[in-house]
Amino acid sequence: MSDIGAGPASALLTEARDMGLLDGEIAPEKFDEAVEALRSAALGDPEEQSRAYEQQPEQTELDRLNRQRTQLRTLLQRQEDELEQMRALRAGGSSFSREAGEQVARLSSLGLFDSADQAHCPLCEQSTPDAVPTVDRLRTEMARAAEQLERVSRRTPGLEAVILEQETKIADTRRHLIETKQSLDALNRSDERLAELRDTASRRAHVLGRISLFLETLPRASDTSGLRTEIERLREEIDGLEAELSEDIIAERIDSILSVIGGRLTKWAERLRLEWGGHPHRLDIRKLQVVADVDGRLIPMSRMGSGENHLGCHVIAHLALHDWFVRHDRPVPGILVLDQPSQVYFPEDHANDRSIADLEDSDRSAVIRLFELLRDVAADLAPELQIIVTEHADIEQEWYQDAVIEKWRGGNALIPLEWISGSSD
């Protein structure tokens, strides 16, 4: 029995076997296999096909289909008889269950009466002959009936499953019987058409022509093995991506990344000599701020005191993030712009043109440490990271002056004065 359906492929297979174009034992189970069998028939050696046809008994395919139909009818009858027996057994069990249930319901009223060692009427409690069952005996009978009812109830689900399975088998047998009848009809129609042709060769050519026409109507995909391989590869890739995108994996990766960034923050906070330098620093992504872990206490930026600490935390946070982006080839623009980072070290009323020479030694050293950190990180990540600083303070050191691109002073500004005044002079 075949699962390829009763369409053109199944009918052509029947005709091809009948004409000797295919071995009578070939019975593909799937559509792809049927198509390959028809291709082999279309590309077969005509002489070998002719000899095979001459050697096979007359009406071979017709006899095979008739035998198959007889077997299917016998099988269907047996399956239907078995189903009737199963349904009768279920009906009998239901009748017994119903009757037992009624008996249990009747005997349940015994709970209203007291038991006694001597025989008496449960209603008037008058003495009765020994032949009348006692209350205890009736209770025993009620327990037995309830137990039988429970056993029947337990067995019913298993019987229902067997009946459902049998109904599925009957449906499959009926489908195969319909396919066999349609194959027989196709073979008879073919015989009627081919009877008008002159000889066996012409009959085979007629069938081959119909097979070729059928094959030409199929999609132009002679070999799908490559597609199947690609589909399987993509499925594996999808499974891998879904695994990587699971909440647990994402949480683990974020923790790992924050641990690496925290190492940078801790190192650079100590280098800048921030207030809590020397203690672990990390990035709190929930509140987007740098925090310090100090002896079991969490110190957020809002409690870190001076503007110098706030500035330092912002700078090392930006540098640590860019360091991660660059080293892991993340699609983030490699540019960091800072505007007057030294401002926190100068009084608000100080002149615009400021020199770090005006600062106290500790503040001057802090400004130099800040710019040295910017210099070293930019050099370490070059050319993927560019740091642009607009700054009034001027450090008279060679490495700093080499990094200066333009000094906007004495009328020389980023935006020319004539642009503002509108003058062309």
Image (spheres, helix red, strand yellow):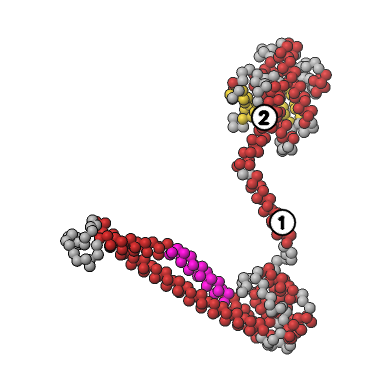
Residue depicted at x 64% and y 36%: 254
Most foreground residue, 72 or 92: 92
Q: Which residues are magenta?
A: 155-177
Q: Is residue 123 above or below residue 381?
A: below
Other-residue count near label 1 (Cα within 10 Å), few / some / many at <14 / 14–19 / ≥20: few
- Which residue type carries mark 1? Glu
Residue depicted at x 24% and y 64%: 133
Q: Position of residue 256 (x, y in %)?
A: 66, 35
Viewer can see residue 98: yes
Most foreground residue, 268 or 224: 268
- In this rendering, would 412 be left or right of 25? right
Q: Nearer the viewer, mark 1 or mark 2?
A: 2
Q: Say which quadrant the C terminus sits in.
A: top right
Is residue 218 magenta-colored? no
Q: Is residue 340 above or below residue 189?
A: above
Q: Position of residue 360 (x, y in %)?
A: 71, 11
Residue depicted at x 70% and y 66%: 219
Q: Position of residue 186 (x, y in %)?
A: 63, 80
- The label on residue 230 is 1
Most foreground residue, 308 or 259: 259
Which numbered disc, 1 or 2, marks the residue that appears first in the sequence? 1
What SS does tag 1 mark?
Answer: helix
Q: Which residue is mark 2?
A: 262
